[in-house]
Image (cartoon, coloured by chain):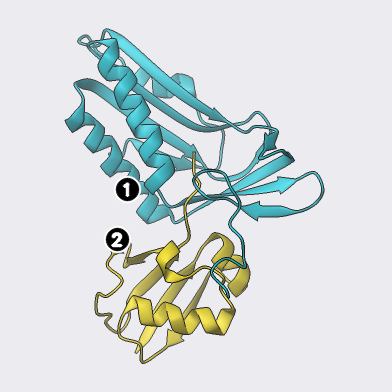
Amino acid sequence: MRYRILYFASLRDAAGRDQEQVDSAQADARLLYGELRVRHGFGLPAERLRVAINGEFAAWDRTLVDGDEVAFLPPVSGG
Amino acid sequence: MNFFTLGETTIDAASLMRELSGTTAGACVTFEGWVRDRNEGRAVLRLDYQAYAPLALSEGARILAEATQRFTIVEARCAHRLGSLAIGDLAVWVGVSAGHRDAAFAACRYIIDEVKQRVPIWKNEHYIDGESGWLHPDNTPVSDREGLS
C-alpha cells in the first residue's frame, strides 16, 4: 500500500525531508514506524511518539488503508 | 470560527484582548509566553517553532472548548507564533474573561498547560555556540540517540 508520511522536528531533521510517499506492506502505524525508523535511523522509539492519521490523533494499532496520511509526532514543546 | 490561532507574524495582543470583553465579564486574566535568553543553563540566540498546523488548530480549539466547559468563563482566546523568533518576542498569548477572577485564573492556567502538553508544536532552540536542538515539553533536549541501544 502507498502512504503519505509527514515528519516533524527531530524526525524531519533525521529523515532530511518533511514528507514522503512510502510503499509498504506494514498494516498499522507501529509496524510502519518500525520500518521507517530503520530506514532513516530515527533515535526515538514509537513509545515516545504519538501518531496522527489523516489529521487526527489515532491509535498505533489502527489498521491503515491505502492512501492514508500518517504523521509521526515527537514529544511536543510549544508554549 | 477557531479561537485558537497560529501565525508567522507578531501576535496582536491588544486586538485579542478586545475580543474578550462582554457585559457579564468582571475579570480578565492573560498569560504571555516570551522567548527567554537562557534554557537549561545555555545561552539562547533565537528559536524556531514548527507545527503540524491542521492538528494543532483542531487540538487548540478542543482545549478552549474544554476550558469553557470546565470553568465558568465568558470568552477564551489563544494565539501561538510559528517560524523564527528573537529573544523577548511574544511566543504564545492566552486570554480569558469571566464573571469572577477564580474561574479566569484557573481557565487561563488550564489552557496554557494543556497547549504545552498536547498541541503538536515544536521548539528548536539555537544556541550562541552555534548548536541547536529540539526540546521536550519540560524544556530538556530531545536526544537523537534516545532509545538506541
Secondary structure state at the residue bearing disc 2: strand
Residue B92: where, in percent of width, then height? Answer: 49, 33
> What is the chain identity of the residue bearing mark 1?
B
Q: Amino acid at mark 2?
A: Glu
Q: Are marks 1 and 2 on the same chain?
A: no
Secondary structure state at the residue bearing disc 1: helix
In the image, the chain rendered in yellow is: A
Can residue B38 be seen at all in this image of the molecule? yes
> What is the chain identity of the residue bearing mark 2?
A
Q: Residue furthest bottom?
A: A25
Q: Amino acid at mark 1?
A: Glu
Q: Quadrant of residue A3?
A: bottom left
Q: Residue furthest front?
A: B149
Residue B146: where, in percent of width, then height? Answer: 57, 65
Residue B32 as seen in the image, left or right of residue B20: right
Q: Residue at x 38, y 17 (%)?
A: B29
Residue B68 as seen in the image, left or right of residue B32: left
Say the numbered circle drawn on residue A4: none
Q: Residue at x 27, y 7 (%)?
A: B26
- Quadrant of the frame with the N terminus of chain B: top left
**Vertical arrangement, residue B77 with respect to residue B83, above or below:** above
Q: Residue at x 30, y 60 (%)?
A: A57
Can residue B20 be seen at all in this image of the molecule? no
Gap between marks 1 and 2, in whole Å? Answer: 9 Å
Residue A22: where, in percent of width, then height? Answer: 45, 85
Residue B99: where, in percent of width, then height? Answer: 22, 11
Q: Residue furthest right?
A: B129
The residue that mark 2 highlights is A56
In the image, the chain rendered in cyan is: B
Say the numbered circle drawn on residue B59: 1
- Quadrant of the frame with the C terminus of chain B: bottom right
**Vertical arrangement, residue A38 with respect to residue A74, above or below:** below
